[in-house]
Every structure is written in C-alpha cells, then in structure tokens.
Amino acid sequence: MIVRTKLHIPHVRRDLVARPRLIHMLNEGMKVKLTHISAQAGYGKTTALSEWAKQCGALVAWISLDIRDNDYIQFWSGVTASIQETIPSFGAVVCSFLEKGLWASLEHAIPALLNDLDRLTSELAIVLDDYHFIENPDIHHSLTYFLERLPSHIHLYMASRAELAIPTARLMAKGDCNQITMQDLRFLLDEGHVFFQDTTDLGLTSEQVAELHHQTEGWISGLELAAISLKHSANIAESIHQFNGRQHHISDYLLEEVFRHQSEDMRSFLMATSILSRMNQSLCQAVTGQMDSQHYLERLTQLNLFIIPLDDQRNWYRYHHLFSDFLQRMGSRTNPDKWVQAHRDAACWLEGYGLDEDAMEHFLAGKHYADAVRLIEKNLHVLVQSHSMALIRWVSALPENSFAEKPMVELFYISVLMGVRNWEAALLRIEQAQPRFQALKVRLTDVEWNQAMGNLYFFSAVASYMQKDLVKTSEYYELVEQYMPEGSFFQTMRRHQYHGYDHFVDFLAYINDLHAADAFLSRWAIALGKKTNYPFAGLFLAAYSKLLYEWNRLEEAELYASQALGRKDTQPYVRISFKSPLAHLGFSKSSGNQTGLQSCSRN
C-alpha cells in the first residue's frame, strides 16, 4: 500500500528566502535527464525542490522515499503512483507487471514504464526525495537502465545525503547530468542577511550575521536553529560566540537550547511523536494521550519549529529529519519505558487503519517481537509475493527465539532468501532450522510436523540442485515424498522464482553432465509425472524430454514433451521452458496441447 502523503509536494512556507540562483540551477534540470541534489541533512534539499516544483510550470511527480521503499516492487510502485497522482490514467500496464511479482517486474516493468512515459505529450519531472534510503542493488541497476533510456521530455530529480550508487559518468560525459552540491545549497552571506532580516525580529547587526554565517558555513538549519535559540538569549553577542565547532556539535547544542525553552507538555509531545515518520491529529493522540494534539501541531507550525506540513489542508505533518533524530535520541535516553510504549501505541493505531508495514516498523523498533511475529504471520502470503526485501529485513531483526515455534515463518523466510538468490544465507537457515523443527515434533500435530519437515526437505533439495549436487537433491526429494507426497503451497507459489528457474529451464547446460542428469531425471520425471496436481513436475518432464532428444531418442522425447505441455498444474511455465529452444530442437506445437517432432536426425 502506498501512503498518499508521500506523493504530495511538501508545503512551502510563505516567508522563505528567495533564491533565484538556486531556482535557476534547478530549472537547468529540465534540459537534461538527471539532476542530483546532494548534501547532508539541514541544507534545504527538500525545501528547494518543493519551492521549485510549485513554480516551475511543468508537470511534477513527487515521492518522498523512506526505508520501506528499499524493495524493488515497492519502489517502482511508488514511482508509478507518483506519476498517477499527476496523470491519473498513467501506468496500467506497469502496475500489472508489478503485481505479478519480482521476476516478472524485473523483466517487463521498466520497459513498460519507459514506453508509457514516451507516449506522454508534456514534459514531466519525476522527483525522488531522500534517495539515500535506497540500498537495494536491483533498484540501482533498474534505475540505471531507466535513466539510459529515459525519453528526452522526462527529467529525473534525485535528492540524497550521499553520492548516488548508480553510474553517472556516461550521463555527465553527454552533458545529461546536472549536479547541485552542498556548496550550491548553502546560504550565501547576502541570503543570510535576508533570512535574519525578513524572518526574525532579532535586529542583528551585519557583523553578527556575518559571524553566524561564518560559524555555520551557510548551513541553513544551523542558521534557523540559531535564530530560534537567540530569541531566548539575554546576551545575543555572547551566545553567537558560543556557536562554534563542527556542525553536529552546533546542531546538538542549538537543538538542546530550542528544546529546553519549550513547556513540559510540549517537550513530552515532541519526544513521543518524534518516532513517527508521518503524523496527523489522531495518530499523535494515540501515542501521546493528548486530546488536543492538533493544537500542538499548529503551535509547532507557528513557531517554525522544524515541522513540515505534508498537504495544503495541514492534516499530515512530519518533523525535519535533523530535529526528529535529535528528539528520538532524547526520548530513548530520558524515558525508555515511555518510548517503548509510544512505539506500541503507534503500531496499534497503524495496524487498525490497515497500515501493517508501518506498524511492523514500530513493533520492531519498540522490541514488541510477539506482535511483530503475529503481524508477519498475518501477512505472510502478501509479503512473500510482493515485499521480499521487507520480509528479509524484518525477520533478520527478530531474535531467533521469537519465532522458534513458528515453522511457517521460518519456511517463508527461506523461500524469500531463495527468491532473491541469497543461496548461502538460505542454506544456513535450512541447516539451523532442522534441529529446531525436530524439537517441535512434540508440540505440533502429525500433519503440521510432516508439512514442516516436508517443506524444509523440499528447500534442501532446491538448494542442493543449485549447488549442482544431484545425488543430494534426489535424497532430499525422497524425504519430501516420505513427509509430503502431494506437495505444498511452496511448490506452487512463485515456483519459477525460488527454484532458480532460469537455471532449470536450461537444465542440461546448467548441470553440464548428461549422464548425471539422466540418472536424476529418469527417476523423478517419471515419479512426479504420475501425480495429477504436483507443481513443477512439468518442468522435470520438459527437461527429461530435452535430454532424450540429446540422446536421439526422439519418440520418447516427444512422449515426455507431450506430457509436459499437457499438464494444467504448471502452465504457462512449461511452455516457456520450450520457447527458446523450439527452433533449435525441432519441437512444434500441434492441436490438443500435443507436440510433434519434425523429421530430423542428430549427428
């Protein structure tokens, strides 16, 4: 689910310092493919982009990224949704691929998105704010592909605290990359003068402004913090002299000064709500118990106290990241029990509104592991289908004993590790799970325990196959037959993904030992082929058909090819397995889902 407030261009304050030089630099981005705005927290990246977006005159799609977007499907779903916010009819084909799961998306979603963008008749700017939250290599690779083929009337703006993890040298060589750095974002001295003159009533002298500008090096948040702090100073000149040292020391000092001058009720409200990445009156009320939470939000806005409205109606807000980080450190240190409870209250509110992913983050942050496991179990099927990276991150954050008696959670975790091809981690989890599953025999029913062991042995077979150990694979399949002869959900769900499908389609080339392949396939293609509803049996039959063709046993090859294509439990994957080698092997589909072999002979 996409949180709609992430797609809104953040509210721009009316008393902003006009920055025509920076706006001009951002306008230059409409002449190139990529504009990268790079600086640490507090340099006004989001504010500059928001101001520019609302006056540039072009269509702008905006998404504010966070850690939950570090998932391929979630990321590109969010990007597509941001465009749909501006162009409602956009992206139906893209969404259909994203809904089919990771591997269908990897192959088809980005080309479909590029095609849809190419059909747009107006210029469009796509803004990805806070891209530093994205670490997933699949996203970086797909974004590189996306940028290289971006239509000339589409422009990507990316704001980040770090250098981009995508190659930009080629774009820069072509003049297609517009770089805006910390030096471009920092206030010049004359902008500092305007800031103190137009947005404060401090009456600072030119020398005092110059000293503050020097101490903060034009760091916008530092100047804002100084302005708030100086309002409470009995000796402005002396206070200014204390603003020295590195920026994080300045920020800690100034933030503490700002925080200290708030009322006790306001300090309590700030610390409790700082855990929220986005907040409204109702959510704030849930974590603070304050019935007049809207009053606090409006008061903070009036004070310009590092709170950002996320919509023009001022229903949703967020804190400036710098302020939020400070408040969270303060809250966790001063009242840890209340801090933990605030996370649980936030999680319960979010779950009540169907925002389970957001709720999960708070259950984990507050170390409410039983609730976290419960929420994972509640959403297992959905999580595995569309949010693989999120599930890996969540289960990795859980203590081992929190789901020791939850074999389905463990099995889903293993399936996801295989889905993202992390074979080493999957093997380790399989080895660790075997003694735990054995210990569960006294707690589970026979049916439950057999299902758990059968699925575990099934994953062991897949892992052995990926290591090209067909003897071990066969041994594990024997155990699968012993515990789970009719198969399970895991053999149906995304079977072409976590099986290393691309390797299995080209079984003979992957194993590269026809005699070993013959010993394995002659047994399991026949054994599994006899089952009427056993997912993946068709791919065994298809692979065996190709092997028989290699031996020039054409009649037998045709028989097994017909069986593979005639099965209903593995369509359309069996057809795909024959697609690429059809011409080479001489297979041709005839009526009734049968195959025929063209007259040919093998040398």
Image: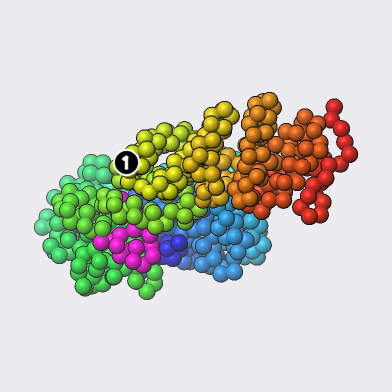
Identified by mark 1, the residue type is: Glu
Mark 1 surroundings: few (<14), some (14-19) or many (≥20) residues within 10 A? few
Left or right: where 470 falls relative to 288: right
Give the percent coordinates (x, y) of residue 553.
80, 33
Dominant SS type (magenta)? helix
Instruction: Identify the magenta region.
Output: 345-365
Give the percent coordinates (x, y) of residue 89.
59, 69
* Residue 388 visible to the viewer: yes
The vertical placement of 521 against 227, above or below, is: above
Q: Farthest residue in the left direction?
A: 234
* Residue 193 visible to the viewer: no
Q: To which residue does mark 1 refer?
A: 400
The answer to if 15 sits in the magenta stretch is no
Left or right: where 330 falls relative to 513: left
Q: Which residue is drawn at 64% across and 64% down?
A: 120
Give the percent coordinates (x, y) of residue 395.
37, 45
Secondary structure of residue under mark 1: helix
The answer to if 351 sits in the magenta stretch is yes
> In what quadrant of the picture does the C terminus appear?
top right
The vertical placement of 344 against 576, above or below, is: below
Q: Residue at x 38, y 53 (%)?
A: 376
**Viewer-closest of 360 and 407:** 407
